[in-house]
């Protein structure tokens, strides 16, 4: 699997507020689908393990969590490779709608949180609800 790791340097702050150019980086998945990566960066929490977060732009409305989960299932195997290379025990895949609006752009997001179990397997905590 081709890892996302080289994108780690693509910072969340790398978004251009005054430009109409896309603020994402196209990344191909093994199945040929292209995802639009907005950012990938480690997240540090005061309680709980650090996590690697992948923010990407989706055409799916975040209210359609079943369709989002299917899309994340396609993304997770490649991203998991990077999470494990970085020795993270948690990961977040953040699906972000395309912002809409004329003057003030608004977009919604939905996060899928993955945690590594003691046996080495990964579980999506969203599936526990």
Image (tube, rainbow, N blue to C red):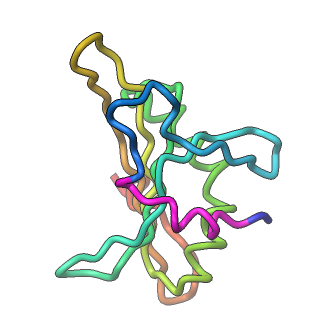
At a point 75% along the width and 38% down the height, the residue shown is 33
Please tell me which residue lies in front, 14 or 56: 14
Q: Main secondary structure of the magenta part?
A: helix
Residue name at image x 42 percent, y 53 percent: 112
Instruction: Give the x, y percent position of residue 62.
Output: 39, 31
Which residue: 42% across, 74% down?
90
Residue 12 inside the magenta-drawn segment:
yes
Q: Quadrant of residue 32?
A: top right
Check the image and name the residue furthest to the front. Answer: 18
Which of these two is toward me, 108 or 125?
Answer: 108
In the rendering, at what x and y percent does residue 74 appear?
67, 48
Q: Is residue 62 magenta?
A: no
Identify the image quadrant of the N terminus: bottom right
Q: Position of residue 3 (x, y in %)?
A: 70, 66
119 vs 58, nearest the viewer: 58
Q: Which residues are magenta?
A: 3-13
Point out the residue furthest to the top here. 102
Query: Number of callouts in the render?
Result: 0
Tell me where residue 38 appears, x and y as whole percent.
Answer: 48, 46
Residue at 63% across / 41% down in the picture? 35
Q: In this rendering, is residue 112 above or below 3?
A: above
Q: Is residue 84 above or below residue 9?
A: below
Q: Is residue 15 above or below residue 40?
A: above
């Amino acid at each position: 699997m081709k890892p996302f790791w080289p994108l780690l340097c693509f910072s969340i702050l790398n978004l251009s507020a005054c430009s109409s150019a896309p603020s994402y980086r196209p990344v191909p998945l093994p199945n040929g689908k292209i995802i639009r990566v907005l950012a990938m960066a480690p997240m540090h929490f005061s309680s709980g393990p650090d996590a690697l977060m992948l923010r990407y732009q989706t055409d799916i409305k975040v209210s359609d969590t079943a369709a989002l989960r299917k899309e994340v299932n396609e993304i997770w195997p490649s991203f998991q490779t990077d999470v494990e290379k970085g020795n993270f025990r948690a990961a977040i895949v953040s699906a972000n709608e395309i912002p809409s609006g004329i003057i003030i752009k608004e977009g919604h997001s939905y996060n899928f949180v993955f945690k590594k179990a003691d046996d080495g397997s990964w579980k999506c905590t969203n599936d526990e609800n």
